[in-house]
Amino acid sequence: MNSHNPPPTTNPASSDSSVGIIDALPLLEAKELTRRFGGLVAVNHVSFTVNKNEIFGLIGPNGAGKTTLFNLMTGLIEPSSGQLIYQGENISQLRPDQIAAKGIARTFQNIRLFGELSALENVAIARHIHTKSNPIMGMLGLPSATSEETRSQKKAQALLELVGLSDRAQEKASNFPYGDQRRLEIARALALEPQILLLDEPAAGMNPSEKHQLSEFIREIRAQFNLTVILIEHHVPLVMGLCDRIAVLDFGELIALGDPANVRNDPAVIEAYLGE
Ligand SMILES: Nc1ncnc2c1ncn2[C@@H]1O[C@H](COP(=O)(O)OP(=O)(O)OP(=O)(O)O)[C@@H](O)[C@H]1O
Ligand SMILES: [Mg+2]
């Protein structure tokens, strides 16, 4: 063998020998994460870890910094200081597309769908991260492009089925009621085949029965896709019933972190957020 050959590169996720090491690490770690907007410290030296397969809740009053934390985790904004470590790698400076490609997908508090596109198209678009044909091949209808397109459509259709919207695949996204748009956004995030799914107030605008269904659904997709979920949600019974652990933010600071029973009875949390 030529001594100039580099050692074979392996994908950690698919290399048997490294699986144990990867699994022993927290999946995601925030280390002293801070984000300032001018004089305002929206996220202030926040540290926590999220383990693989956890459903991790993020709660706190309006303006506490929850969405800012998601924006940091998905590369929409950069930290002022501190780090985000994902599978042992510092991802603090990566772009949103690079972070998505590494397996972190999200939904938005203010739903971001392509209103003029159909439900199916909204989900199929996200699949492009997993299709390798270039646009010219697609335009010319060359074989690999068309078969990938077919696969994407099938996959998108299956995801619509999963979120209960398959019979309305061709309808414009803007025609869907609020709760359905939130489900559609989840389908689009799942199309990225993420390791971590970040949900920013997914139950907002849902009625009590839809909230209950959503909770069951999050449990199901965790099992089916071996997912880790980080959930921002104001509906406290949903968070308490669903999450393995909960972090509480107040004015950008982490004021509590633990299992639901501990967090519910924490005097600082009761004062800042839960009330009597
Ligand atoms: N891009 C920005 N520029 C300036 N200030 C910002 C920006 N994004 C967030 N903020 C401020 O940072 C603070 C935290 O906002 P953030 O949206 O993270 O709160 P939140 O916990 O998600 O609140 P809510 O429950 O209302 O969604 C707020 O004071 C907000 O006004
Ligand atoms: Mg928010």
Image: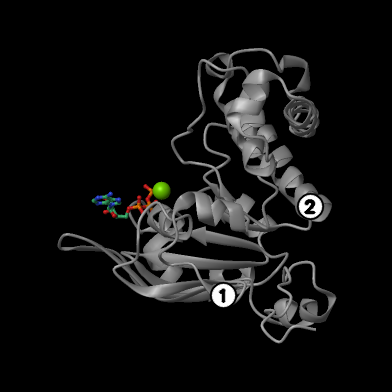
The quadrant holding residue 2 is bottom right
Q: Quadrant of residue 6?
A: bottom right
Residue density around tag 1, few if under 14, some if 14–19, many if 20 or more, within 10 Å: some
Query: Is tag 2's residue or tag 1's residue first in the polypeptide sequence?
Result: 1
- The spot of residue 230 in percent (x, y) is 59, 58
Residue visible at 45% across and 60% down in the picture? 94
Where residue 263 appears, as percent x and y from the top left, is 55, 70
Quadrant position of the C terminus in the picture: bottom left
Give the answer, above or below, for where 30 lies relative to 221. below
Provide the residue designation for mark 1.
49
Quadrant that contains the N terminus: bottom right
In this rendered view, identify the residue nearer to me: 156 or 212: 156
Amino acid of disc 1: Thr
Say if residue 125 shows up in the picture: yes
Q: Secondary structure at mark 2?
A: helix
Q: Local crowd at mark 2 within 10 Å, few (<14), some, or many (≥20)?
A: few
